[in-house]
Amino acid sequence: MMREPTMTLEQQLLVKPLTARVNTAQPMDLAVFEASGGYRALRLAIKELSPQDVQARVKDANLRGRGGAGFPAGVKWGLIPMGPDAGVKYLVCNADEMEPGTFKDRLLMEGAPHQLVEGMLVAAYATRATTGYIFLRGEYVLAAARLNQALAEARAAGLLGRNILGSGWDFDCFVHTGAGRYICGEETALINSLEGRRANPRAKPPFPQIAGAWGRPTVINNVETLNNVAPIVLNGAEWFRDLSQGKSPDGGTKLYGVSGRVKRPGVFELPIGTTAREILEVHAGGMKDGYQLKCWLPGGASTDFLLPEHLDLAMDYDTIGKAGSRMGTGLLAVVDQTHNMVSVVRNLEEFFARESCGWCTPCRDGLPWTVKILRALEAGQGKSGDIEQLVSMTKALGPGRTFCAHAPGAMEPLQSALKFFRAEFEAGIRADQAPAAGSPASSAAG
Amino acid sequence: MNDNLIRLTDLEREVPFVLSDAERHEIEHALGHYPDGRAASIEALKIVQQHRGWVPDGALAPVAALIGISAADLEGVATFYSLIFRQPVGRHVIKLCDSISCYLTGYDALRAALEQQLGIGYGQTTPDQRFTLLPVCCLGACDRGPTLMIDDDLHGEVAPGAVAELLAAYP
């Protein structure tokens, strides 16, 4: 879908390793995939590389986790116990794409399912995992069918299962589909869900690499991360680092995207570190006529809002982090001037409140409380002190105060909206309520 | 006396829940994917739901026995996950995305059109048992907002004016 006619597929794969093969109407079957170089990385790894060699290539490439946290995949793999006595180990693909505003993994799984299967195989080889699971959200029905088809083809061809390619190495992989609940994307909640339990997160440590699924060492990688693994093994770490064309200290391409009222919403594979302005204005065609950019979420509901003045920042983990937000999944949701920020944040917090697993009190009780205040402000029925209460909740539900990152993530859009658009919140205070003493913009209060 | 007789007759009329061969076979197949039976709990509930539209009370004990956990344990799982239905639903389940990208591109108007057309709100089923309306997390099709799913079909860029025609395709 993103192929330029002047380049061969082979050339395209060196520039856009993730999407050059993507065809959502009819993805490549095994034969076509292999003809395009598919499973060559797996064959190379099995024949010529040790698991440690594969780990080293991915570590050298500095492939950072594409699920949102940006943790280097090679380092994560390095924490897995190796050696002949390591026993049963699991590789889990986090394909529970549910971060609001994120629609990249669906594209890869529907459009090039064999890429993920090969990524799983190479990652399993590198970590000596014995069984793999693709934890897929239940609503991705088409992706499930296509992944199961790809797994069946690979199994029939001896690429998956017992004695893979005659090497004596066994690895099988299954699609595990979920039944709703955003919290399943949190990796320890995901493990509980995979084990057939309620998806409450687990305490860390122990980290999943030491004691994960069924108490065994477990690696959990995102779909996009795993799609990068085979190309790195095949083309080398230096090739991967150069893909960013000097736009970022990080390597590789990134699936960026834009949703909201823009001319051409969609997903674009670009060098990591491409500016948000280029993504929005060039690739997504800019705002629709009659709409102006008010602010934007850089990578999902659990990232801080940024302003139009931040558009020239490189979209990589460190740059967006320094600007006070997070790159997250890298898919921009743009808010246009027709939206009131109280309503936008109310929508976001309703989502987080509903999706709280209920395990810890600040999250279970705090998030509905923010929703209650935001609904009052939205209706112009806010009370004096409501905004101060919201500000204090961004701390009380922040990092270190809750069992997992769910509520802290929920506070990111709230705290940034309060910082940039406080007057819109103050306008929701009822006219007969005196502004709180010391409120910096009390003169603007309704 | 009379009251007791009536109750006894009701009990006799109540058909005990029996897993079909197809359900049993599919659950046993799923069990083969995991080192532990409990792991198949969500899949097993989904299998029953696929065959019956929802998970009736009577299903809990036989499914739990098949995977080797208690019925109470299985109910704990069933009630956690939003897409396991422990109440009867309509022939078609509408899952309307209420997350941020769809919110920014016309969710409110689409929800209003659906509720007006169906005469129901979230969590309700139309009196003719045709549709159930539910909110759902971001469907991962944010470039096509506002979106919804009807059964397994994803629909994007659904204009409020197109709702009637869309629903007509699901008799």
Image (cartoon, coloured by chain):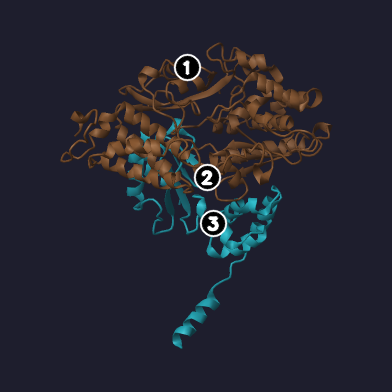
Marks 1 and 3 share the same chain: no
Crowdedness near tag 2: few (<14), some (14–19) or many (≥20) residues, C-alpha within 10 Å: some
Q: Which residue is mark 3?
A: B76
Query: Hey, which residue is sitting farthest left in the picture?
Result: A432
- Check the residue under mark 2 and report the chain it is in: B
Q: Which residue is mark 1?
A: A314
Q: Position of residue A217 (x, y in %)?
A: 68, 39
Quadrant the N terminus of chain A occupies: top right
Residue A44 showing in the rendered view: yes
Q: Position of residue A411 (x, y in %)?
A: 40, 35
**Quarter of the image where one finds residue A202:** top right
Per the model, the C-alpha gap separating discs 1 and 2 is: 38 Å
The amino acid at mark 2 is Asp
Q: Are marks 1 and 2 in contact (CB under 8 Å)?
A: no
**Quarter of the image where one finds residue B158:** top left
Tell me the cyan chain.
B
Please report whichever mark, 3 or 2, sits nearer to the chain's N-terminal start.
Answer: 3
The amino acid at mark 3 is Gly
Q: Which residue is mark 2?
A: B152
